[in-house]
Image: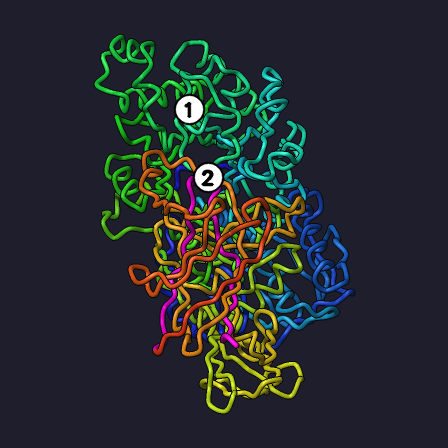
Amino acid sequence: MTLTPLRIVAVSTFALTAALATGAFADSLTITPAPAKVVRAEGTFTLSASTRIHVARGDIEAKGVALQLADLIQRSRGFRPKVVEGPPAADAIVLTREGPAGEAYKLDINAKGATIAAAKRAGLFYGAMSLWQLATPDEAKGPVALLAASIEDAPRFAWRGLMVDSARHYQSLDTLKAVIDAMAAHKLNTFHWHLVDDQGWRLEIKKYPKLTQVAAWRRNPGAAVNYPKYGGFYTQDQARELVAYAAARNITVVPEIETPGHALAPIVAYPQLGTAPPDASKMGDWGIFPWLYNTDDATFAFLDDVLNEVMDIFPSTFIHVGGDEAIKDQWKASPKVQAKIKELGLKDEHELQSWFIQRVGKSLEKRGRRLIGWDEILEGGLAPNATVMSWRGIDGAIAAAKQGHDTVLSPHPVLYLDHRQSASAEEPTGRGHISSLKDVYAFDPAPVQLTPDERKHILGVQANVWTEHMQTDQRMQLMAFPRAVALAERAWSPEASADWDGFAKRLPAEMARLKVLGVAANPVPFEPQPALSEAEGGKTRVALSTGLGVGQIRYTTDGKAPTATSSTYAGPIELPTGAVLKAQTFVEGQPLGRERSWTMSADLLQTRTSGQLKLCTQQVPLTMIDDAPAALDQRPMMMVDIFNPCWIWEGARLDKGAMLSARVTQIPFNFQVGKDRDKIPLHPPATPGGELEVRLGCSGERIAAIPLGDAARNPGLSTITGRLPARAEKADLCLTFTSRSLDPFWVVERMTLKPAN
């Protein structure tokens, strides 16, 4: 599949009819993205093991789609319909070319069978995906009754994308295939593959073997420096395999080879490419690095060679060249680069970057490809045929469209899926600001600041899964899904049919389908989360809420699992010590998220993890893992603002004094933050190992300084304890560490506060 010059599909008629269709009809069909037009009819068609899928004799493309549909039905229902070439019979699924063009399709279901009609393979495939979704409303096996309906559907945007960052953390090919399966099932059609960054080079380039022998591997910082090198790469055969796998599912793989910045890894492999000596030890750091490619002709020859091999593997029209976060300090300090600026008659380093990007773009144009880059490529001027991916909000997209350039909207923070999805302490590792499923769904990819003609330059929309803090394949998937499904609906469905409540009703079916497809989807934002407090008579008051407020919370206190008929949570519950509270969210009678359970005890009230404590500031909040245990799944998570490691225990009772027990650890400060590093506060220690300081409020009286002692010599978790003096009133306790250096820095994993004896 190749993205055509068509930017926004004309869907005004579809939008009108979609608006006229009742919500009940659309919701009962549970198709996501919501179709443009749905007309319900009487009756049902039962899909069973005896059902046949018919295609015209000799139609190889249609037969391929039919086989894919049969495979998916087997995965979800446990039986595989037979694919037959020739005239259709009764009680069959029929694929016909007598339908709309492009990615559009018609799907008709009645008591006698189902017909998928589309002129192109892409439309047949998407009709098959909608039919499979109707056949997979849950995880049940066996025959399924499909409601009779007539569906007409077409996409709103041509570019419906998801980016996966394999440079920071390497994912297996099987994991990427599962992501592509989930994308295809929801009509996303562009897989942007981030293969190169400071932390690693992931694609085999035969002419430059050191890119994978050297640049694909790194030493991690801190205690993990003594572990085996971390990394991996994809051979060209593996990349071609993924390209073919994606193409069979109507997905184009767009590779990204970063220039001129984010280039530490290749410069480590070939130092002559840079303007300053590389430091391989920094490949395990995060942030914005100063290493840029130099502007020598030999460097452009290297990039031409690399891109030629890349284009041999990836047939996509677009090749992504990065262009973001290129700090110019090394260019400013390089006499050769400064001489190049004068030689070319350029104004400054920004114009030099523009010249650099345009020179790379000319190499792509020679092979009929188009350059796309992050919105920084607008700075200093842009080649006429270049396309802008706007990540710093939507301003880059607006500027690009007004200048006549095509653009893809991919704004931070809402479509940066490394941000956590809810305030729950159980969210996977990632950035601490929240971009919820509802936030993603609320994003409209067509800015009102643009005229109708300017909107024609919007190719579409994309979400990005940056993996700095997603150390495992599962964590990457948890951060991508189900938010990528919300993006898919806003990218495909007509603007007028956007309906969060309708989308939310389909979530139980969506989570079931993602499970069938083998994708780990994050259930935490749907699940009941407790807020605990003391009540009279030694009881515990439990207030329950969910991150998204979707559905109803049902609960039990008799030890039984909650069901759709259990008591509905309506307000705080007071329970005695030893009582067991179980709760689960239900939507339209279907469970959503996992069952949660809590046993009332003093420890439940007296212990809080770092994620349950309040951060003193929200400058750069991250959920991170300890670096000490060798096994990733054994490393605890901690929430911390890396610019101000400081936590607050709100409303602490100190009327009898208290014993504080804190589980703490030290982790490397491996962040490239430039001069901002000097702004991070350091508190001088009074003892050799430093202390955990406790204050009444962050600017209040210090009431304790608990020595770290032996913990200072332990790279893993340690427990320290100390006594807090009595105070008549409840207090907000502010917790900070003293230290002589920023690296490593100390973090709280959890703490317990018990009344003193």
Relative image position of residue 266 (x, y in whole percent): 51, 22
Disc number placed over residue 743 in the picture, else none: 2
Residue 510, above or below 165: below
**What residue lies at 36% left-to-right and 64% top-to-bottom?**
16
**What residue lies at 55% left-to-right and 38% top-to-bottom?**
222
Q: Amino acid at mark 1?
A: Trp
Q: Secondary structure at mark 1?
A: loop
**What residue lies at 69% left-to-right and 56% top-to-bottom?**
72
Q: Magenta stretch containing residue 744, yes or no?
A: yes
Kindly report the distance in space between the C-alpha atoms of the residues bearing marks 2 and 1.
22 Å
The scheme the figure's colours follow is: rainbow
Relative image position of residue 290 (x, y in whole percent): 39, 27
Relative image position of residue 343 (x, y in whole percent): 27, 8
Disc number placed over residue 291 in the picture, else none: 1
Would you call the spot at circle 1 few (<14 residues within 10 Å), some (14-19), or many (20 or more)?
many
* Mark nearer the N terminus (2 vs 1): 1
Find the residue positioned furthest to the front.
687
Q: Secondary structure at mark 2?
A: loop
Q: Which residues are magenta?
A: 729-757
Relative side of 705 to 187, left or right: left
Residue 516, above or below 240: below
Q: Magenta stretch containing residue 83, yes or no?
A: no
Magenta: main secondary structure equals strand
Q: Amino acid at mark 2?
A: Asp
**What residue lies at 59% left-to-right and 21% top-to-bottom?**
205
